[in-house]
Amino acid sequence: EMLEINVIRSPTTITDVFRQIFCKFLRFIGKNLTAERITHRATIKQDVRIYDALVAILRRHGFEGLEIDLMMEKHEIISGFHISGNSMTDLYDDIHVRKQLSLEVEEHDKLHEKMNQMVNVMLMMDHTHMELLTKIDILTDRYILKKRSRSTPISI
């Protein structure tokens, strides 16, 4: 992603090369102010492209409308103005932190789901245990009643 920004910053297009040559020519003939204006406009366009690239990177990492605006405001990144390397580094760090938090939340949710499954299994085991105890009580009562009925003499 940083490479993507560096590609935007470096003059790689033929238009940039011709603009630089033209500005050097203008400076050579004494039109420094005109050359500065052309260079300034090109710099603003470049800064807008960098801003748009940063927005695209944020979107790729799951940020949306207001989140993007807040992130840009937090790092003092404004469309059309120079974006310092420190601002971009801080922005990437925040993206990384959010990604880590997202992974931790996913892991937490998985653990929570496993715990719920374990609780359900334990409840099922408790229910089964209670059923077994009830059946054992019933069988024990029947056995005792049967034993008593056999052991008592029949009186006539």
Image: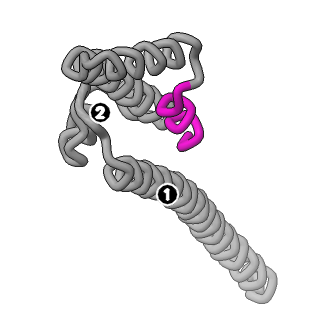
Give the overall secondary structure of the magenta segment: helix
Please name the residue shown 59% across and 23% down the image: 12
Which residue does the numbered mark 1 point to in the structure image?
100
Label 2 amino acid? Ile
Q: How is the image coloured?
A: one colour
Q: Residue 71 location, x and y as percent?
A: 27, 41
Q: Nearer the viewer, mark 2 or mark 1?
A: 2
Whether residue 127 appears in this view of the structure is no
**Mark on residue 68?**
2
Q: In this view, does 47 lie to the left or right of 110?
A: left
Q: Give the range drawn in magenta.
A: 1-11
Q: With respect to residue 146, does 108 lie above or below?
A: above
Q: In this view, does 113 lie to the left or right of 148?
A: left
Say left or right for 37 vs 57: left
Q: Which quarter of the picture shows residue 89?
A: bottom left
Q: Which residue is drawn at 42% across and 13% down?
A: 22
In front of the other: 64 or 90: 90
| Nearest to the observer: residue 58 or residue 146 | 58
